[in-house]
Amino acid sequence: MQTDEWQHLSPWEQQRVRIRAAVEQGHGQRILIQQSAAVMWGLPVIGHSAEVLLLAVPPTHGQRRGGLRWVERQLLEPITALEEVPLTSRAQTVLDMAAYLPFEHAVPAMDHVLRPDPVLGLPSLGKNHLLELSGSLPGQVKRLRARQVIDFADPRSESAGESYSRAAIHRHRFLPPELQQQFNTSAGRYRVDFYWREQRLVGEFDGAVKYGRGDAALAPSWDTLRQEKRREDAIRATGVSFIRWSWDDISREPQHPESLVQRLVRAGLPRSRRR
């Protein structure tokens, strides 16, 4: 691929090209796992990994070489292929992410597979199937981590940012919001990402990039901004408060004054007593 062609690709497309090249240029079969498999499946991956993750087949366990890392994983379903690239199944991929990654990083992919994928023409995965498979993960801790992600997952979260936000809200023990609440306003009917009914508080995630789909970030037009301002004003007129946050806000340390945590505290959202 020429340099100018590469530079015109979005970060997600570049990642797919890099991962695919790592599989195709090697000797012997290379099988993608975890985040690398997730990229090929079009699942949201939080953060950027410099390494391509491959299934370790003895005696390659633990090897690292030239941006490649071979990792041992217990197969829960047979290896499959996508665009002639061998990789773990969607169910195995999200369960490995749930078992081995931080909670917030695993939830977006799990939310995603609970919905049909119109891009790849794939059906949704059921929680019962995922829970059954998780029972074969190695070790009680890994099984518990995976089941916590499955139980929490919700297909109503429509983007990686919404999923990550919901997971962060949960981890910091704030009251859980209602998802995709409808508001009838003088300007029309609108739906919001998060709503805390008792506090009359609306929460909205503003994402510049849609994770896992390879879309380039596009600056919103003036007309788009004007329409969004009209929408927010109409929702506020129903008597609710409004809070917005971005990827920058949810990636900040909780003590940062502009973090999601501090924004929710200033909005008066209480925390639950659960541990």
Image (cartoon, grey):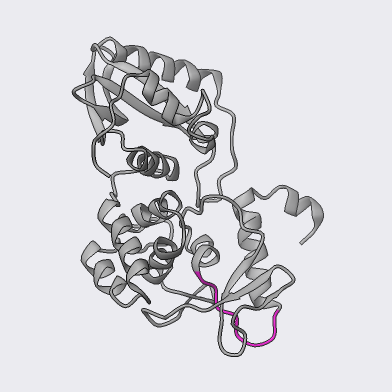
Q: Quadrant of the C terminus?
A: top left
The residue shown at (49%, 67%) is 34
The residue shown at (44%, 41%) is 161
Q: Depth check: 255 or 145 in front?
A: 255
Whole-percent x and y of residue 225? 49, 19
Q: Is residue 231 above or below residue 167?
A: above
Question: Residue 29 magenta-drawn?
Answer: yes
**Which residue is situated farthest in the left direction here?**
198
Question: Residue 262 magenta-drawn?
Answer: no
Q: Is residue 117 above or below residue 272?
A: below
Whole-percent x and y of residue 79? 45, 81
- For the stretch drawn in magenta, what is the main secondary structure? loop
Q: Which residues are magenta?
A: 26-33
Q: Is residue 214 above or below residue 272?
A: below
Q: Quadrant of residue 136?
A: bottom left
- Left or right of 204, for residue 32: right
